[in-house]
Image (spheres, rainbow, N blue to C red):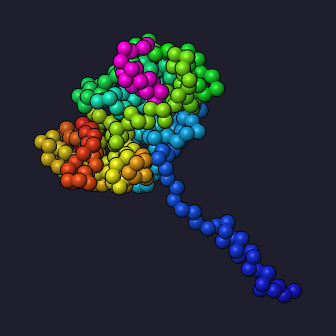
Amino acid sequence: MIRRAGAIAPVLVAALLVNGCGGPRSGALGPAPTAAPSSATPPRDAPSSAPPSGRPDPTSTPPSDPPRAPTTTPPSSAGTTGDTVTVELWFVRAGQLVPTRRARPTTVATSRLALTELAAGPTPAEAATGLTTLVPVGVEVTRITDGTATLRVPSADDPAQRRLREAQVVWTLTQFPTVREVRVDGDAPVDRTDYADLLPPIVVTDPIPGERVSTPLTVTGTADVFEATVSVRVLDAAGREVATGFGTASCGSGCRGGYRVVVGWRVAREQNGTIEVYEVSARDGTRINTMAVPVTLAPGG
């Protein structure tokens, strides 16, 4: 039987419509980065890299270049690895939220662990960068029902201090899949987006203060900067610049997007160093909104 050529045209048109390319998608807030897969069954309120609610997550870091092989759980995610669990903690510096991580013995009570670590405060390396905590000892989740964690947070005389304290708790607890929002002292439930204004223009999720890093290093985080351009430089123990790099966040001026910048350096010996992530001023070309992370530089090059 001979088929007419005219009958093929609609099929081709339909195929093109189904397989056509869509434009890139971006927004002010994107999905949280994913943690490495694990064959172990997660505990009841084990942490997850999924967004904590239907609203997008301001800490997103969409993948671009392959990340370096981490020695701990990847940034902006929490999970279990063998006998340890890594949790993300949000501390305060200069009235803004700054993240770091902790690896601790595995427990099913990860929300309690996270609140305990918040109350314990920053490590000496973190405190040296100005990090502090406003969360007192004794804050506990009373229940978690339908994705809402209920707890009491001691009041503060200063409303701004109270809001920062609540923001620390909300941003920390909503990393877990069982917690999408938090109800504090009987108020209406809130989630991360209610405190997104407390983020600095540049957030660094990896590396964390005091970490030993090797070259090449993948620096990750989120940013809301001019033309979405994020710059990175590496300083050695003497303050000399040994590496530079830059990248583009997934969303630019006026919205927050994830960035990933790879840098490499040459140093002959292991030494203290600093990773600086900053924005270049559109007005005069100076470095602004700088986030400095003290690290230990492994030799390489």
Q: Position of residue 172 (x, y in %)?
A: 45, 28
Q: Is residue 40 visible?
A: no
The residue under the point 25% across, 39% down is: 292
Q: Position of residue 293 (x, y in %)?
A: 27, 38
Q: Is 177 displayed left or right of 66 in the figure?
A: right
Is residue 158 found inside the magenta-colored segment of the image?
A: yes
The residue under the point 17% across, 44% down is: 236
Q: Is residue 248 visible?
A: yes
Q: Residue furthest right?
A: 1
Q: Position of residue 204 (x, y in %)?
A: 35, 40
Residue 202 vs 79, above or below: the answer is below
Pick the quarter of the image with the N terminus: bottom right
Q: Nearer the viewer, residue 288 or 126?
A: 288
The magenta-colored residue range is: 154-171
Residue 207 vs 183, above or below: the answer is below
Q: Position of residue 157 (x, y in %)?
A: 37, 14
Is residue 25 found inside the magenta-colored segment of the image?
A: no
Most common SS among magenta residues: helix
Q: Residue furthest left?
A: 238
Residue 197 vs 83, above or below: the answer is below
Q: Is 136 displayed left or right of 43 in the figure?
A: left
